[in-house]
Image (cartoon, rainbow, N blue to C red):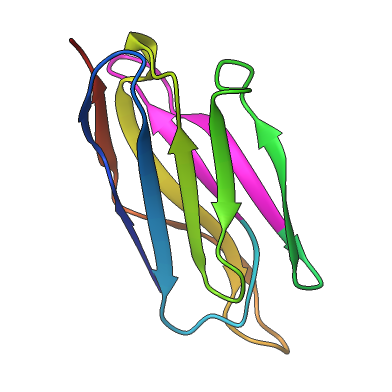
């Protein structure tokens, strides 16, 4: 299983950026996908999470610092998650990591954590 994240870059304060992450490989079911971020000198933190149940996906977590500015979404019937970021601030500068909690088998499989490589978001004028 691989998670490929892309979309990071340099943006001015107040600007927008969209991150995407595609999960590929032998995947039976994904319980949730999320975006984490890690700023220099800080611990990695959960930014947003989207959970899937019975074919329906819904965002069930946003960090307080990004509420009303970031939106997480998932393509229908695809293992791709997006993070639309608006009103970016200097403090949003970080390496953003894609995460998935999934199982590779219908029967007898275990649920495991998977991480993508980070994508750097820099908010600067």
> Would you say 21 lies left or right of 107 here?
left
Identify the residue at horizontal 38%, vertical 13% (top origin).
89
Residue 34 belongs to the span the image colors magenta? yes
Residue 107 drawn at (x, y percent): 73, 89
Which residue does the image show at 61% across and 24% down from the upper left?
63
> Would residue 88 appear left or right of 47 to someone viewing this image?
left
Residue 9 highlighted magenta (yes or no): no
Q: Main secondary structure of the magenta part?
A: strand
Compared to residue 71, the image places residue 66 above or below, namely: above
**In terms of depth relative to the viewer, which is nearer, 125 or 106?**
125
Q: Quadrant of residue 110?
A: bottom right
| Residue at point 55%, 65% (across, down) | 75
Query: Picture coordinates of residue 45 (x, y %)?
Result: 50, 28
Give the x, y percent position of residue 79.
52, 70
Residue 71 position within the rendered picture, expressed as x and y whole percent measured from the top left:
57, 38
Seen as rendered, the residue at the extreme right is 54
Q: Which residues are magenta?
A: 33-51
User: Above or below — where is 84 with respect to 12?
Assistant: below
Horizontal side of 103 relative to 92 (left or right) equals: right
Q: Residue at x 40, y 57 (%)?
A: 21
Q: Quick check: 98 above or below 74?
A: above
Image quarter for residue 111?
A: bottom right
In the picture, the quarter occupied by the C terminus is top left
Left of 73 or right of it: where is 55?
right
Q: Quadrant of the N terminus?
A: bottom left
């Amino acid at each position: 299983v691989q998670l490929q994240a892309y979309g990071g870059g340099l943006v001015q304060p107040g600007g927008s950026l969209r991150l995407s992450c595609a999960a590929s490989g032998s995947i039976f079911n994904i319980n949730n996908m999320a975006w984490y971020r890690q700023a220099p000198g800080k611990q990695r933190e959960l930014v947003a999470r989207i959970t899937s149940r019975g074919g329906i996906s819904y965002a069930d977590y946003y960090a307080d610092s990004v509420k009303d500015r970031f939106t997480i979404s998932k393509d229908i019937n695809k293992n791709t998650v997006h993070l639309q970021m608006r009103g970016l601030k200097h403090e949003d500068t970080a390496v953003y990591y894609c995460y998935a909690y999934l199982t590779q088998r219908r029967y007898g499989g275990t649920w495991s954590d998977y991480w993508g490589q980070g994508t750097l978001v820099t908010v600067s004028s």
